[in-house]
Amino acid sequence: MTGLGHVHGHHHHHHHHHDQVLEGSAQGLRTLWFSFAVLAVTTLVQAVIAAASGSVALLGDTVHNATDALTALPLALAFVLGRRAATRRYTYGFGRAEDLAGVFVVLVIASSALFAGYEAVRRLVEPQDVTHLPAVAAAGLVGFAGNEWVARARIRTGRRIGSAALVADGLHARTDGFTSLAVLLGAGGAALGWRWADPLIGLAITAAIMAVLRGAARDIWHRLMDAVDPALVDQAETALTGVEGVRAVSAVRLRWLGHGLRAETSIRVDPALTVAQAHAVAQAAEHALVRGVRRLTAATVQIHP
């Protein structure tokens, strides 16, 4: 049979890359449990000192660290779900669970901002002396060290495996670290007798949390709307146009499912090709996509004469 009278689709799942996604999930889980343990210890130390000192800045930082530790739980659940095989109901698998966990992270960040802001305003209206200032300063340093340690681990792993939710959570932890340093300023102001210094630092911490909230919400929105970096589309088009037999690339669509990419593309070939020859071109196009686009786990190639 010669000629291509209609569109032919070709789909292949790349097991090597699927294995990479599974390994990525395992790496993500290890990072999440590590960060949960570090932040749980950090929060416990800060909570004891916040209760004894009455520092609202430290209280806000403690609450933020506690919520940051708790966000590890839905993300871990999402990584576990994402490893499950596709079913007849969930034909694309469970990778979207990671994006839903990202929504939960955003909501947790928002709630911690509201709580910290409320406590800071309340303390401005009803001033209160802060005691145990050296301990408050030490708690701020503990918070910075714990958060920066966790942030580096989450961001490094998230970028390596392509997890937007994990990177967002890492950036969240990094901001927590700098807000912990701000607690030192509040303690310094209180030592000089400035009763308003501590609640003002609390408001500054609230503003920092809101900045993180904006960035994290934007990243998760992009994932939910199937947005990808345009550079990835350029990479895919470059890979396809270099394949022998591909006359033109009609369309390239990419989407993230968890921390793996899927591709759908339409290519134009010589209408005089046999079905077998066109199929060979489609296979070559798939392999070129896999080599040219990182973290691509599956591709569907449509052939147009």
Image: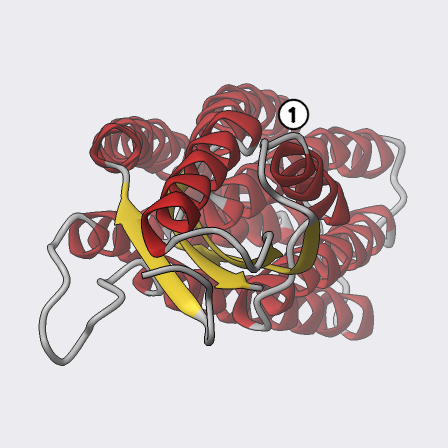
* Up-down relation of residue 263 to residue 92 (above or below): above
| Rendering coords of residue 6 (x, y %) | 46, 76
On the image, the x and y values in percent for residue 14 come to 27, 38
**192 to the left or right of 182:** right
Residue 69 shows in the view: no
Q: Which residue is mark 1?
A: 137
Could you tell me how many numbered marks the image carries? 1
- The residue that appears at 26% across and 56% down in the rendered structure is 78
- Can you name the residue that lies furthest to the bottom here? 89
Q: Is residue 302 left or right of residue 241?
A: left
Indicate whether 262 appears above or below 20: below
Q: Quadrant of the C terminus?
A: bottom right
Q: Kindly identify the amino acid type of the residue bearing the numbered disc 1.
A: Ala
Residue 120 occupies quadrant:
bottom right
Location of residue 268 in the rendering, given as x and y in whole percent from the top left corner:
62, 57
Which is nearer the eye, 40 or 187? 40
Residue at (62% x, 44% y) in the render: 246
Q: How is the image coloured?
A: secondary structure
| Residue 10 or residue 53, whichever sits in front | 10
Label 1: few (<14), some (14–19) or many (≥20) C-alpha neighbours in 10 Å: many
Q: Is residue 90 left or right of residue 118?
A: left
Residue 149 visible at all: yes
**Picture coordinates of residue 96, whole percent (x, y):** 35, 64
- In which quadrant of the rendered image does the N terminus lie? bottom left
Helix, strand or loop under label 1: helix
Please name whichever residue, 177 or 288, is drawn nearer the observer in this view of the structure. 288
